[in-house]
Every structure is written in structure tokens, then in C-alpha cells.
Image (spheres, rainbow, N blue to C red):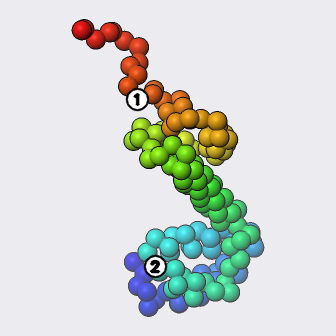
Amino acid sequence: MVQEAELPAVIAQMKQRLDREATRSEATELWSAAYVLMGMRYADALIQTLLQGVIAMEESVTYQKVIRKGEAQGALSEARKMLLLQGRSRFGEPPPEAIAALDTLADISQLEELGVRLLQASSWQGLLGLPEPGRRTRGRKKAP
């Protein structure tokens, strides 16, 4: 295990070796991998200091994939948040089954569609296609 005090020397050795043996594309990918792995153990400020001027991760396909994934997760989170804010304003506090239904949606287009449907819906249940409260679903009738 590399101690924090040893990191500058390790980074310098990595740079020398990558400059000698790797193509620019390979070096970018390897620096990106090192960045991600270092992030599992060390503080961001330390990593930024150590890798300053060494890499151009923005060129890395791995880095770009991580960025796209984070952006997609952020968009989903914000769409859910906005739907909940607008729905609370229109229908009141959502029942637990409505929150559970929203949490299962992982497609931004579905959440966007719900945002449009919210304008016509009259309840959380109507918006999400959930059974209305007090209504029984199909099954046997209760005995009187």
C-alpha cells in the first residue's frame, strides 16, 4: 500500500514511464484510471495537487463515460425532484406508493412524460396509474 507521503514520487515515476512507453491515448486512459482509483482512497484536493499538469482527462473516453453517467443520474434525480415539487403543490403530499413508483423510474423520458401528464391529472394515483384510495382491486367481494 502506498502511503500519502510516497505519492509524489509514485506519480513522477508513472509520468516518466507513461511518457516513454505509452501513446497519448493510452496515457490518458491510464491517468484517468489512476484518478478514479485514487479517489477511492485519497482526498480530492490531494489528488488534484498531485495530478495537476500531468493529465488531460477530458480527452479520456473513460472519464467522459463517468461524466455522462453522472449527468444522467443527476438529470433523473432533478426530474424526480421537480415532479415531486409540482405534484405536492397540485395534489398534496404523495402517498408512499407514489414515491415508490417514482423511485423505480430510471428513464428520463418517462419522468418528462409524467411532468406533462401532471397538468391533466387530478391525483397522484391518476398521474401514476395507481389504484385510487378506497377502491378495491379485482378479487373476491368482502362478506357483509
Front position in the image: 7 or 39? 39
* Residue 46 badge: none
* Residue at (52, 85) in percent of width and height: 45
11 or 120, nearer to the observer: 120
Task: Tell me which amino acid carries mark 2.
Answer: Tyr
Mark 1 is on which residue type?
Answer: Pro
Q: Secondary structure at mark 2?
A: loop
Residue 74 position by quadrant:
bottom right
Q: Is residue 28 left or right of residue 10?
A: right
- Residue at (37% x, 12% y) in the render: 139
Q: Please tell me whether residue 53 is drawn above or below residue 71 in the rendered image.
A: below
Task: Work out whether 53 lies above or below 38.
Answer: below
Quarter of the rendering occupied by the C terminus: top left
| Quadrant the N terminus occupies | bottom left
Mark 1 is surrounded, within 10 Å at the Cα level, by few (under 14), some (14 to 19) or many (20 or more) other residues, namely few
Q: Which residue is mark 2?
A: 42
Q: Residue at x 64, y 86 (%)?
A: 52
Relative horizontal placement of residue 21, taking residue 37 as reference (left or right): right
Q: Mark 2 or mark 1: which comes first in sequence?
A: 2
Q: Which mark is residue 133?
A: 1
Mark 1 and mark 2 in contact (Cβ < 8 Å)? Answer: no
- Residue appearing at x 51%, y 43% in the figure: 91
The alpha-carbon separation of the residues under discs 2 and 1 comes to 51 Å
Regarding residue 69, the answer to whether it shows in the image is: no
Residue 121 location, x and y as percent? 59, 35
